Image (cartoon, coloured by chain):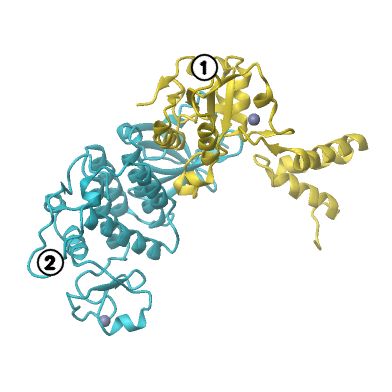
Chain colours: A yellow, B cyan
Amino acid sequence: MNESPHGSSTITRLVESFHRLPGIGPKSAQRLAYHVLRAPEEEARALAEALLDVKQRAVLCGACQQISDTDPCAVCDDTRRDRTVICVVEEPLDLVAIERTNGYHGLYHVLHGAISPADGVGPEDLKISELLTRLRRDDGDDAEAVGEVIVATNPNLEGEATAMYLARLLEPLGVRVTRLARGLPAGADLEYVDNVTLERALAFRQSVE
Amino acid sequence: MPARVPRVTKTEAVVLKRRRFGDSDRIVTLLTPARGKIEAIAKGALRPRSKLAGHLEPMTHVEIMMAHGRTLGIVTQAQTIEPFAALRDDLERLSAGLYLLELADRFTVEEAEADAAYVLLLTALLRLLRGDGHQLVVRSFELALLEATGFRPEWQRCAACRSEVTPDRLVWSPLAGGLLCERCRESHPESEPIDVSVVKVLRLIQDAPYEEAARVRLNQRVAAGMESVMHDLVRAMAERDLGSARFLAAVRHTRPVDDPAATAPDEPASLDGDVTYTPQEPLGASGQTGS
Ligand SMILES: [Zn+2]
Ligand SMILES: [Zn+2]
């Protein structure tokens, strides 16, 4: 970098790193960079360590595929949870949103996206085979066998496509497939839906087909 | 001095796709009759109480009010004309609809007149909605869109030199954009044999009125052949893979093979006169699930 608008190429580098983050425009990136510059060294060190830790320690839970520090994750490891229900969500943040309602006590499965052919995301790019493996593993006669899969994908085009495709795949496995109740705002993102609405949608879920 | 009031225009559009923009906005790609394909920002569309979000889902026919920002248009109001809700409740129709959207997106460029593409897309979506066979709707859309965008495939003569083709050994190449004669196929190592029945149905869909093509009955083998040919052609013309074509195939694999036509033995292609299509399902019938 030969010319730096900030008179310092190290600041320029930090501004550019912030600018690459989602939702951060050039102005905010500058503000963040100068904040870090003015902050005590411990604060900067804590931020840097948190950044590295999340890359080094966070793993995917081998069962539910959520991002976790442990495998299995805390939810899958919790013996008080209802193991007969799996709630399928698109993103880890959707899982967080449902947990926040305190109204769901079963297990989860994170797909890490939704079917969106125009963006090149097909079923093979999601954690669908991992879900099928999970469901096939239990042979149906023990008390902990999964009896219901709640498809809690977003109430938008991609979410609906994913839900219908999943229902098609799960049908032959003999599990009940349910979908969040209608009433969620069309085109919405679960991550942004308020707790009450989300809890109600879960409580009044409906069978697919 | 008064602030400059941005020009606001009203337009119809079909929403092709959308992406997140920042924490609360979305950028939508719209196909419009007058301005072709445009991108516009829908502010606050990610917020739960957004008045815009529900109207700006892909595969929606909308009327929008748009202010002209410095770079992107800004959607100020949106009102659904046709939500195509029934297409969203049926995996086969939904995947066909997604394919139409992706094709329309691939074969139009931004801010260039695309009136034909707009009309074709809207017509095809309405035909899917009313329950026309997917095969006919999708194939006639592909052929008409390719023609409207200057990629009309050649199913009558040699696409390279215009000479006659030998009807008993038809070959074609997606790169050449149609059939090839004996001589020209030498310079096209990628050329492949093509079923004469497939060629005849493609000719019919390309040149006959839609209602006439809808009366043709064809068997599973011809339908599958046509689909594979058209997907290869579209991939060659768009110079890339279409995600929605792969999804169509994935959806098909989830269906049990219970259709007798799917397992019927191949009948020899007829070479003389009109092809008599084994009556399995009329091309225009409702509930036809494609090949
Ligand atoms: Zn887990
Ligand atoms: Zn030739």
Label 1, secondary structure: give it.
helix
- Extreme residue in the front direction: A141
Q: Is mark 2 within 8 Å of ligand 2?
A: no
- Find residue A37 and report its image quarter: top right
| Residue B63 x, y percent position in the rendering | 35, 36
Q: Which residue is mark 2?
A: B270
| Residue B111 x, y percent position in the rendering | 42, 54
Where does the N terminus of chain B fall, quadrant-wise?
top right
Viewer-proximal residue among A166 and A191: A166
Query: Which residue type does callout 2 highlight?
Result: Ser
Q: Quadrant of ligand 2?
A: bottom left
Q: At 39% across and 56% down in the image, what residue appears?
A: B108
Label 2, secondary structure: give it.
loop
Q: Which residue is mark 1?
A: A197
| Residue A67 x, y percent position in the rendering | 67, 35
Q: At 27% across and 67% down in the image, what residue appears?
A: B153
